[in-house]
Amino acid sequence: MKQRYSLVPILGLCLTISSHAYAKNAEENKLAVKPIAIAIHGGAGTIEKSRFSKEQDVAYRAKLKEAVEAGYAVLEAGGESLDAITTAINVLEDSPFFNAGKGAVYTYDEEHELDASIMDGRDRQAGAIAGVKHIKNPINLARKVMTDSVHVLLSGEGAEDFAKRQGFDLIDNHYFDTPHRLEALKSAKQKLEAKKSGTKSYQAAHQALPSQYKMGTVGAVALDQHGNLAAGTSTGGMTAKRFGRIGDSPVIGAGTFADNRSCAVSATGHGEYFIRYSVASDICARVQYQNKSITQAGNEVIHDVLAPIGGTGGVIIVDAKGNISMPFNTKGMYRASKSSTQNTYVGIFKKD
Ligand code: ASP
């Protein structure tokens, strides 16, 4: 006689085993912390410790800390790297300390012209704007170009027309005025006039301006829990810039680059060199094709490629494992970082 077995207990056993396995996996997933990381910069240049008062030092560090932690909070809550970098950059753009948004430098004609760009490491989507005069937070408009236009780079009045249609408020150019930047413009112009003697052109005179007139800029790079990298940069460009000059900051591959397969980079420095040497994408290419670490790739480009030809500045870099590197070849670079394995770090000078 055939014995008949009930399938119920067997099914029950299977369910129990698989639910145990599921619970174990969920537990392991929780324990396997997904790395998150963010780094920001507020410009590189001749930042002399001796000319920096104690109060300034405290105030700059506090603002950098506020920005990096605001961006980190987005990542910690499970947010996207694009949101984290935008949040951090907005804090820096709204501060008069940095050459971006409020606090942007003056052009030769005593106006402000702003540039910004953003890149998504998932699919290399990118957006950028150049030479806008009435956008409070240029990084937000760069992001809108990425998400809501079929273009990568919009400039001047066209970019502002696009902004209006996307619901951005256009603000008065005087919003960006600050007494210390006006002072810097006046002294830059005096130096330009002094150097412009004889056959020297405006360009040659500008080339000879000390580096503090050519630096500033803010930027951020981040890795989120989903493994996505993003980079963004926002700037007022160079003091006394003229003829619609555009630097590296809105140029994808020069001032900004992100690709999940390599790294995310935001640059600050003498833009013309950063454009000519495709600094941001060169660093990521060394990581991707030569299997170099971001520290090695960043040091090579900043110290071995740029420094010997007089290209001053620095970069912030983050990779897909959450490593952070922030090399610069100037006296200082305003910078800060935080990751799932590292507490908040804030630095200004080389020895910080
Ligand atoms: N790279 C920016 C530019 O050339 C300036 C800066 O980073 O300070 O416009």
Image (cartoon, helix red, strand yellow):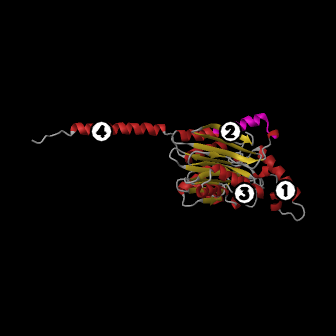
Q: Which residue is mark 3?
A: 305
Give the residue number, with chain letter if any, for mark 4: 15
- Residue 311 falls in image quadrant: bottom right
Q: Amino acid at mark 1?
A: Leu
Magenta stretch: residue 53 in it?
yes
Mark 1 closeness class: few <14, some 14–19, many ≥20 residues within 10 Å: many
Q: Nearer the viewer, residue 72 or 263?
A: 263
Which mark is first along the chain, 4 or 1? 4
SS state under label 1: helix
* Pointer 2 residue: 346
Q: Nearer the viewer, residue 191 or 249?
A: 249
Q: Is residue 169 visible?
A: no
| Main secondary structure type of the part rendered in magenta | helix
- Could you tell me which quadrant the C terminus lies in? top right
Report the residue marked by disc 1: 192
Q: Is mark 1 within 8 Å of ligand 1?
A: no
Q: Amino acid at mark 4?
A: Leu
How far apart, in angstroms, are the residues tagged by discs 4 and 2?
Answer: 52 Å
Badge 2: how crowded within 10 Å, few (<14), some, or many (20+)? many
What is the crowding at mark 3: few (fewer than 14 residues within 10 Å), some, or many (at least 20)?
some
Is residue 245 found inside the magenta-colored segment of the image? no
